[in-house]
Image (cartoon, grey):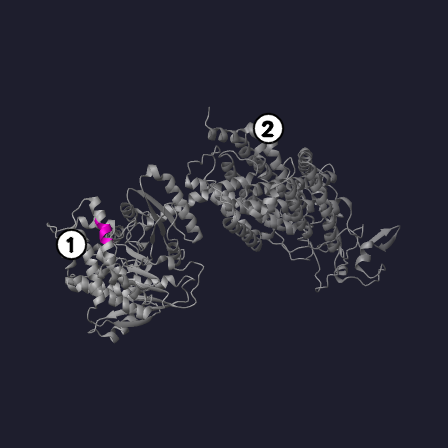
Amino acid sequence: PLPAPWKQHGSSQNPLSRGFLPNPRMGTFIGVYLPCLQNILGVILFLRLTWIVGVAGVLESFLIVSMCCTCTMLTAISMSAIATNGVVPAGGSYYMISRSLGPEFGGAVGLCFYLGTTFAGAMYILGTIEIFLVSALFWAETAEGEAAAMLHNMRVYGTCTLVLMAMVVFVGVKYVNKLALVFLACVVLSILAIYAGVVKTAFDPPDIPVCLLGNRTLSRRGFDICAKFHTANNSTTPTALWGLFCNSSMPSATCDEYFAQNNVTEIQGIPGVASGVLLDNLWSAYTDKGAFVERKGTPSVPVPEESRASGLPYVLTDIMTYFTMLVGIYFPSVTGIMAGSNRSGDLRDAQKSIPTGTILAIVTTSFIYLSCIVLFGACIEGVILRDKFGEALQGKLVIGMLAWPSPWVIVIGSFFSTCGAGLQSLTGAPRLLQAIARDGIIPFLQVFGHGKANGEPTWALLLTALICETGILIASLDSVAPILSMFFLMCYMFVNLACAVQTLLRTPNWRPRFRYYHWALSFLGMSLCLALMFICSWYYALVAMLIAGCIYKYIEYRGAEKEWGDGIRGLSLNAARYALLRVEHGPPHTKNWRPQVLVMLNLDEEQRVKHPRLLSLTTQLKAGKGLTIVGAVLEGTYLDKHVEAQRAEENIRSLMGVEKTKGFCQLVVSSNLRDGMSHLIQSAGLGGMKHNTVLMAWPESWKQEDNTFSWKNFVETVRDTTAAQQALLVAKNVDLFPQNQERFGDGDIDVWWVVHDGGLLMLLPFLLRQHKVWRKCRMRIFTVAQVDDNSIQMKKDLQVFLYHLRISAEVEVVEMVENDISAFTYEKTLMMEQRSQMLKQMQLSKTEREREVRVRERVGVGHPHGRAQQGSPSEQSQNGSCCHALLSHQAQLIHDRNTASHSVVATRTQAPSTPDKVQMTWTKEKLIAEKYKNKEPGVSGFKDLFSLKPNQSNVRRMHTAVKLNGVVLSRSRGAQLVLLNMPGPPRNRQGDENYMEFLEVLTEGLNRVLLVRGSGREVVTIYS
């Protein structure tokens, strides 16, 4: 039997378990070709195509249709590639985009497609009502308020129709699907009737008279006879037309000047294919709003500009026309190519049917549109084409007059086709919204994922109807069309992008069955979609992009984390790889140098972080810029500790989230802490993205017996960073550092600058002050001068240097006066050495050594030195909290003087750490460490130990540390942070413990200290 996980996985993928097979499966023709045909052919073909041909001319109309059809064809090719790359469940285009480009793009484009489909529903309903009002039933008889009445009628009837359609959809989709074929039959019959009508005009053009006054078209609404006078029974009487233009029906009446000057003529509205009218209709005739619809080439006597009285029966243009606007109005008539892919769940073989059916449908409809443009231009008089509402034909549909056998074929066919398309939109849009809601990527849409017991999306339908109603309230087909053009174009653009990205990335999972695609075609399609968006309407395009952008950012910010293996993630990986390869060559220029930090965290027994404030400091120092690697070491073997390692990594990541530390977590399991830290320093990072600075906490309890992170590890890590030419920051008293939420109202960041080590000491306070925590703090720089130095000149030089660095800070030079070594210093040094010396003299077994430690501890308590030592911390803790840096520096300077080596390297600074109480206890680690350092072959008695005299160089160093600590405390007592140069560890490892003691004394009594040891590389420059 299969293991449980396999069973579960298998059952979820099994088609039978989802109730697929019992459904009747559809083939290419019924499932894809016909739905696409029905969605593509629709309201625009019947209501606007003749008008577009008349206004733009045959050539420009041909260009508009070719552009739009090319756009959809390229999109269909990309869509076919995506649709055949695996199973596409319900959700169609949304599913394809979201799984290819990720939840953010998927959600943004899915909602755009949803809005497009919803507005398409509004457009179809408006088309239905326009046919109903203008052609089938009646028209507001009075010219007064005609347009306003028409708009109100559209709103009222449109709303009623919407409610009716929504109820049909709510009651059951099966009725919509049953009616779909009836509606489609109407569309096909209508188109066949148009072609039949065109053929008939070649030998028997219909008699459709159009009345012209001069070259202006007249609206056949208030008169029947197209003449000024009517002769009957040998008497001539003025016609109804005369009454419309004159103030009385008498021949002597005062008439409109243009009416008086020009003749009334009657022409044939549909002269037929053989008439050669095509040549007149080749070129465009764009006009402003309210212009007369005029016939080219007809004589006309111009008159002075008269007031266009609304009562005169002229046919006027209702909107201003121009090329780009027509593209926006026409584009919705080529949408609907997704109809097949949206039904992918119901197809017998979706991977075969979707490409074939969609592309065939686009080819068919493109042919119909292009042929119709040429045929309309060749058959119909220009003024009739430009007469949008058929006023010259008494309100009849222009296309209906062309059709054979009867105009009613077109009226009924177009009415049902727009009804059907409206129902399809109201059926499809809620399902799309439901699919998005159920994915859970947009939290506030969750409610729309629910529906009736059978899964019908009730709430989604309600929202769709409300959005649709806003479109109906606009009440103008020409205003709604460009809105949905935007949303569809946006959707198509991302389908092309998805295909192009997947193809270029060559993802192993990208294996479409449809072979006839190429990334260049997808890019061309994407560019065309973008161009068409801005051609249609640049402001609508910007609004649509803004909406999509807002949804994208919202999903990124609030949405659920989805891992769909999308192309954008692959794109990010490719871009990251490319960038890393570019960064590889050579170190960065000084101008680009910023601390790329490796943060060394200590973990407790439960794999939790010991000093979380270290991450707070990292965040304040980095402000999200550059590289941050958070490293930690677990002791043991990876096989035994991999579960703990996983838990520790999760803990660190969650803490990084809380502290808003943007970076990477790297955890190493090693046989001991020392090796683990060395491995991290050597190998953390990738390629050019490696750290150049190590940040760690001072080992607070370095003198305690049970401390695993012993002082040895610390000193060796200091040596490692120096060897790796990396800077080191040690935070002392790290738990006193501020959290990211805290704000210092004022205060100082004091820099005690003794050795120039590349300017890191200058750069760190500047970087910290970029963060809100430290923003209001002032920066002060103290530098140390000997008695014989020219301190005034030093101060001037430093001020000039800072000015050129563009860093604002107060500068102060502190003079160190040589004075006698105090008894306290002498005592402290002696105790430090006694402890080391004693360990060297003991060559005992391990158990005896441990027993001796306990004895010495008891001796230490009663010894006079012990008392002196206990007094020392209290003495020093009275000092302020800002002077550690000077101490450490002078300790190093004294050391240099004694060894006669004034090398800069010896005095480079290192990183900050946490301070600790000075307790001169004998620890087990120190005993073991000192065992190997014994150079005297003989073992002398304990009395030699107490007759020791301290080493003079150690006394001098201790003196400098105590002295410098005092000076720092006197100047920086109230500072929020003190930065000090950190001296390097001694070359001879025997002095390691003394080195720790010097650093401890140097920083004693200070609250927050950052010990800084530069890498010796310049990190600040005065040049731009």
Please state which of residues 457 and 120 is positioned toward the viewer in this rendering.
457
Q: From the viewer's perspective, tell me whether residue 723 is left or right of residue 763.
A: left
Furthest residue toward top: 1
Q: Residue at x 48, y 32 (%)?
A: 513
Q: Quadrant of the C terminus?
A: bottom left
Read off the residue under disc 1: 942
Which numbered marker is on residue 471? none
Magenta extent:
852-857
Amino acid identity at mark 2: Arg
Density class for disc 1 (Cα within 10 Å; few <14, some 14-19, many ≥20) is few
x and y, in percent, of residue 183 in the image: 68, 36
Query: Looking at the image, can residue 22 be seen?
Result: yes
In this rendering, which labeled residue sits more in front, label 2 or label 1?
1
Disc 1, SS: helix
User: What residue is pinned by disc 2?
Assistant: 25
In the image, residue 4 above or below residue 963: above
Which class describes the residues within 10 Å of circle 2: few (<14), some (14-19), or many (20+)?
Answer: some
- Is 468 contained in the magenta span? no
